[in-house]
Amino acid sequence: MAHPRELRRSLADCPLQASKLIGISLGLVGGLAGLVGVVGPDGVGLPAVVEGAVLPLAVVPLVGAALAGVIILEALHSSYRALRAEAALRRQLAARTGYTLVRVIEAGVAVGGLVAVWRLVSTLDNGPVPVAAGVGVAGGLLAVGGMVIFASLLRSASELWYFS
């Protein structure tokens, strides 16, 4: 566990990772707040949905989709840099095995999430969508967005404090 002074120093040393971690955390908290506002102790509250409490639920899929795009671009860029480096690729990967594993898991979740969304949306027919299918699609998008956010949260936290 990092000492609080080390924590402040690492946040100051890595402003991009720190801001990414804060943004991801806020998106996750906003999505959870929306979920708690819609799903109460008595189940799904239709008055809450009518009043617009479901709007924060859109945060998770949108943030997840944006993160998935950024993660894939980061993975492609870092792969290109690793291939162009003078050191052998095997040596680079062996030097930071844990970090490489975290990055591969994050990229795999991002690519898998985009494929899952594509498959989910491609199964829908043209025209009106039944309510049950719409709820299923919204739940699927929420789950995929949550997985991408969680994977990115783990990578940001581990990169900021464990692998810095």
Image (spheres, rainbow, N blue to C red):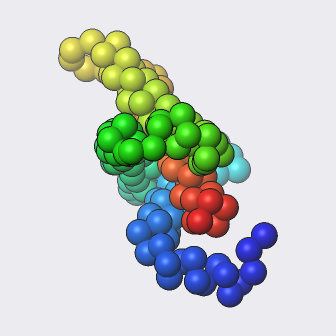
Q: Which residue is drawn at the image coordinates 30% and 16% (left, top)?
A: 122
> In this rendering, would 47 be left or right of 10?
left
Residue in the foreground of this view, choosing between 53 and 94: 94
Asked whether the viewer can see residue 146, the reply is no
Q: Quadrant of residue 72?
A: top left
Quadrant, the C terminus:
bottom right
Where residue 130 appears, as percent x and y from the top left, is: 37, 20
Image coordinates for residue 146, horizontal then vertical, percent: 52, 44
Camera-side residue of 122 and 113: 113
Q: Quadrant of the N terminus?
A: bottom right
Q: Residue furthest right?
A: 1
Residue at 64% across, 79% down = 7
Is residue 46 shown above or below 116?
below
Q: Which image quadrant for residue 2? A: bottom right
Q: Is residue 30 above or below residue 144?
A: below
Image location of residue 153, percent across then percent down: 56, 54
Query: Could one spot residue 67 in this view of the protein?
Result: yes
Residue 113 placement (x, y as % from top left): 44, 31
> What residue is at 50 percent from the left and 82 percent from the top?
12
Rendered residue at 64%/66% (across/down): 161
Q: Is residue 41 left or right of residue 72?
A: right
Q: Closer to the camera, 112 or 90? A: 90
Residue with the most extreme left position: 127
Image label count: 0
